[in-house]
Amino acid sequence: MAETEILLESGTNEMEIMEFTIYGESYGINVAKVKEIMMSDTVKPIPHSHDCVEGIFKPRGIVLTVVDLPRYLTGKETERQPKDLFIVTNFNKLNIAFRVQAVVGIQRISWKDIQKPDKTLYRGEDDDGIATGIAQCNSQLITILDFEKITAELAPETGIQMSEIEALGQRTENKKHTILFAEDSVLLGMMVEQSLKKAGYQNLKKFNNGKEAWDYLCTIRDNEDLYEKASLIITDIEMPEMDGHRLTKLVKDDPRLKKIPLVIFSSLINKEMEIKGKSLGADEQMSKPEIGHLVAVIDRLLEEGEKEWTNA
């Protein structure tokens, strides 16, 4: 894809999902996470791995971990077929192949048309299931899976590590600045909140999607103490209602709000996404789960932002 095409698509609040099926049920994955689709291949088992991790295989010299997605979703032994496919993904700087049974195609959809699943489907208050949303394409309902959560459940070491905060040493408590944080995952949002508070940032406002964060910013936009109420914004990219790129565009197109430092913290950060985020005016972009790096960037941006607002 040419850079001009990437820039033209930035901030439209749309995404493309790849629809696939497992035992006749339709599921989806953000195309931005997909590297390629391959025919399933022989997999070498890994001793003592999770039951849903088939093992590894090595196409074209690259070692890939294979996740048995049908087994993960159903809890039953997978009936493997010759026509099964591997969806090879890249997110959180990890390359992982997921077994699926068929790929239907690619659908383009607005984040406005993606709804969070009903809370009755969750296992508890701190759980938001393995679906980031439900999309309706024509008459078909597609469950968009949370591949980051699936991966973190199978391999906890790939998730946010509190040890990164502890490695920063003694921190000064910061009650002066308010950080706005837009993230639709209940579990990840809770982990980031705990990490930032451990790093000294006590004033956090959590939003479930970009629209909630934008609506709040609109209510405080003309306040004299705007910078105290919104000292810095952290946003995920994938969120129902309004994604992080659309939120970034709205903030950075506003003559007053654009002074607020904005960090995109997403599993999708790669070269293409960096071009998109930069074109929209994001101050920094980084891949989950680099929480230690995030704190260091917050420290720097708040220091720089305070000087700018003081001199304004």
Image (spheres, grey):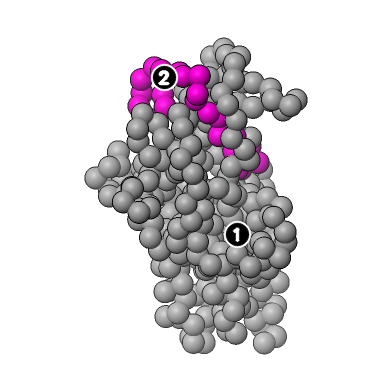
Q: Position of residue 283 (x, y in %)?
A: 67, 66
Near-viewer residue (36 or 194): 36
Disc assigned to residue 102: none
Q: Quadrant of the N terminus?
A: bottom right
- Residue 73 or 286: which is nearer the viewer? 73
- Is residue 78 rendered magenta in the image? yes
Q: Is residue 252 left or right of residue 220?
A: right
| Residue at image mark 2 | 78
Query: Does 306 lie within the magenta span?
Result: no
Secondary structure state at the residue bearing disc 2: loop
**Which circle, 1 or 2, is nearer the viewer?**
2
Q: Is residue 207 visible?
A: no
Residue segment shown in magenta: 70-94
Residue matched to label 1: 264
- Location of the C terminus by quadrant is bottom right
Report whether residue 70 is seen.
Answer: yes
Residue at figure coordinates x 57%, y 81% from the top left:
254
Residue 295 in the image: x percent, y percent? 63, 55
Q: In the picture provided, is 222 more to the left or to the right than 279?
A: left
**Relative to the observer, which residue lies in front, 63 or 183?**
63
In percent of width and height, residue 116 lies at 35, 53
Residue at point 60%, 30% (across, down): 38
Residue extending furthest toward the left: 120
Residue 150's place in the image compared with 223, above or below, is above
Look at label 1 and name its amino acid.
Answer: Ile
Say what amino acid the circle numbered 2 marks: Thr
Contact flag, marks 1 and 2 (Cβ < 8 Å): no
Q: CA distance from mark 1 to mark 2?
A: 37 Å
Q: Is residue 308 above or below residue 33?
A: below
Q: Residues within 10 Å of mark 1 (few under 14, many from 20)?
A: many
Which circle's residue, 1 or 2, is located before the other in the chain? Answer: 2
Q: Residues within 10 Å of mark 2 (few under 14, many from 20)?
A: some
